[in-house]
């Protein structure tokens, strides 16, 4: 089967989109959104995620506990949890629309404009998923930096530091947006 150049580029964009969606899912569920370090006890590092809090000890043991209440979370983590779940759902929906609309599949043969409409819907959903990934990651990073440099907080209170998902979360958002832009403007 010989693929056109357009079909190859669409499959490449689909692989990039799949990578962005998987990265977004990993970012959602990994408990490393914020690191909390206490100067009194340097042997433990507290990490906070959207779903649980973990204590990593120096000897390698890790103990995790789910958050007791959704309402007890800080506002940025509550909103981030909702937006990241929305992003994962939009990404999955976009993957479905886009995979059905690819040129390499023999679907919608009786309807000439249906493939283009599916690609447009998938592109719009990817763009929305990218935005709903970037917003929570940026908000958590912003509040972490503000808390770290807050002069009103005593030095004994644990200072937050940016953890890996804040940098990981910056990857799936733009990749999903790029795929969305490409699929929305790709020729039929």
Image: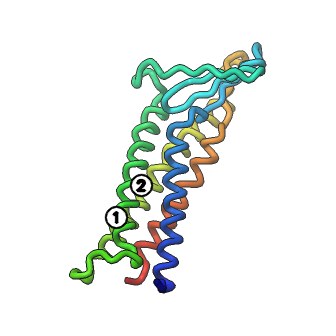
Cα–Cα span, label 1 and label 2? 10 Å
Q: Is residue 57 above or below residue 129?
A: above
**Quadrant holding the C terminus:** bottom left
Q: Is residue 17 above or below residue 39?
A: below
> Is residue 73 toward the left or the right of residue 46 in the image?
left
The colour style of the image is: rainbow
Q: Residue at x 35, y 56 (%)?
A: 93
Q: Residue furthest left?
A: 110
> Is residue 101 toward the left or the right of residue 162 in the image?
left
Q: SS for tag 1?
A: helix
Q: Is residue 139 above or below residue 187?
A: above
Q: Give x and y (percent) for residue 10.
A: 47, 74
> Of marks 1 and 2, which one's residue comes earlier in the chain?
2
Q: SS for tag 2?
A: helix
> Toward which corner of the image does residue 138 lie, by quadrant?
top right
Q: Residue furthest top?
A: 40
The residue labelled by disc 1 is 97
Q: Residue at x 54, y 64 (%)?
A: 16
Q: Give x and y (percent) for residue 168.
A: 61, 47
Circle 1 Cα neighbour tier, 10 Å, few/some/many (<14 / 14–19 / ≥20): many
Front in this rendered view, residue 59 or 133: 59
Front in this rendered view, residue 140 or 173: 173
Q: Residue at x 60, y 42 (%)?
A: 165
Circle 2 Cα neighbour tier, 10 Å, few/some/many (<14 / 14–19 / ≥20): many
């Amino acid at each position: 089967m010989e693929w056109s150049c357009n079909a190859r580029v669409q499959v490449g964009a689909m692989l990039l989109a799949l990578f962005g969606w998987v990265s977004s899912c990993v970012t959602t569920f990994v408990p490393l959104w914020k690191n909390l370090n206490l100067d009194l006890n340097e042997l433990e590092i507290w990490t906070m995620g959207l779903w649980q809090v973990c204590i990593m000890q120096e000897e390698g043991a890790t103990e995790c506990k789910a958050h007791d209440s959704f309402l007890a979370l800080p506002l940025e983590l509550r909103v981030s949890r909702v937006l990241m779940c929305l992003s994962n759902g939009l990404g999955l929906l976009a993957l479905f629309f886009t995979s059905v609309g690819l040129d390499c599949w023999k679907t919608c043969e009786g309807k000439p404009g249906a493939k283009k409409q599916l690609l447009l819907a998938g592109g719009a959903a990817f763009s929305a998923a990218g935005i709903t990934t970037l917003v929570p990651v940026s908000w958590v990073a912003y509040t972490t930096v503000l808390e770290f440099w807050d002069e009103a907080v005593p030095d004994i209170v644990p200072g937050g530091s940016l953890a890996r998902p804040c940098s990981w979360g910056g990857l799936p958002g733009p990749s999903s947006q790029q795929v969305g832009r490409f699929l929305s403007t790709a020729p039929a």
